[in-house]
Amino acid sequence: MNYIFLDNGFEEIEAITTIDLLRRANIALTTVSVTGKDVVLGAHAIPIKADKLFADVDYTDAEMLILPGGATKLIEHKPLCELLQKHNQQEKLIAAICAAPAVLGQLGILQNKQATCYPGFEHYLGESHVGGLVVESHNIISAKGPGLSSDFAFCIIEKLAGNEIADQVYDAAQY
C-alpha cells in the first residue's frame, strides 16, 4: 500500500494530480488525514475527504509515503515524522513535492542524497539541494513545485509499476 498525507493547507494540484494518476495506474493508494478529521482543506479552500485518519492506519504494509507541498507544518506531526524516519531507515520509498522536501531535510532523511524543492526552501535541504525539476536519489523522489505535479506522479508510477504502465497512463491522459 502507498499513502499520501494531507494536512490543512496542502497544495491541491500536487495532491489531487498525484492521487488521480496513481489510481489510473491501479496503484493502491490511501489518502490519510493528519488533522484528526476526515475532511482536509487545501490551500485554495478545496475540501478533500481523506480515506483514513492517521491514527487508524497500520503502516506496516507501506511501500511509499508521499507528501504534497503546502502543508509545511507536517513537521509538527510527530507520529508522521517518526513514520518517515523509520521508513527511510528501512530504505523504503518516500516522495515529496514543492515545500514538502523541507520536511525530509529537517528530519535528516536527505543526508547523502540529492533533492529539489520549491524556491525559498533550499536551506532546509542543505547540501542535498541540487535543483532540477524532478530528482530521484536513492529511495527519495522530490519535485520542485505545482507545475510539475504530473511529472512527479509519473516518476512515482514508473518506480512503483514500471515504464509500461506509466506509458499507458501517460498516453491515456494525453500528456
Image (tube, grey):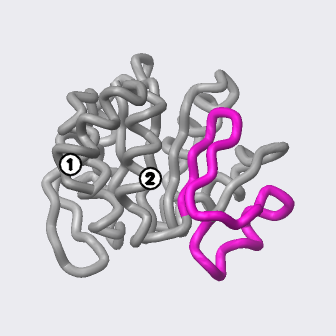
The kind of residue tagged 2 is Phe
CB within 8 Å, label 1 to label 2 = no
- Residue 158 image-quadrant placement: top left
- The residue that label 1 is drawn on is 20
Boundaries of the magenta span: 117-143
Sequence-first tag of 1 and 2: 1
Left or right: residue 13 versus residue 131 is: left
Q: Position of residue 169 (x, y in %)?
A: 24, 40
Residue at 20%, 37% in the rendered image: 23
Q: Is 129 within the magenta?
A: yes
- Residue in the foreground of this view, choosing between 26 and 89: 26
The kind of residue tagged 1 is Asp
Above or below residue 78? Residue 89 is above
Left or right: residue 142 versus residue 15 is: right
- Residue in the foreground of this view, choosing between 77 and 21: 21
Residue at 69%, 41% in the rendered image: 137
Callout 1: helix, strand or loop?
helix
Q: Position of residue 117 (x, y in %)?
A: 61, 66
Number of other residues with Cα within 10 Å of mark 1, as a class: few under 14, some 14 to 19, many 20 or more: some
Residue at the limit of the structure toward the top, as seen here: 61
Number of other residues with Cα within 10 Å of mark 2, as a class: few under 14, some 14 to 19, many 20 or more: many
- The residue that label 2 is drawn on is 152
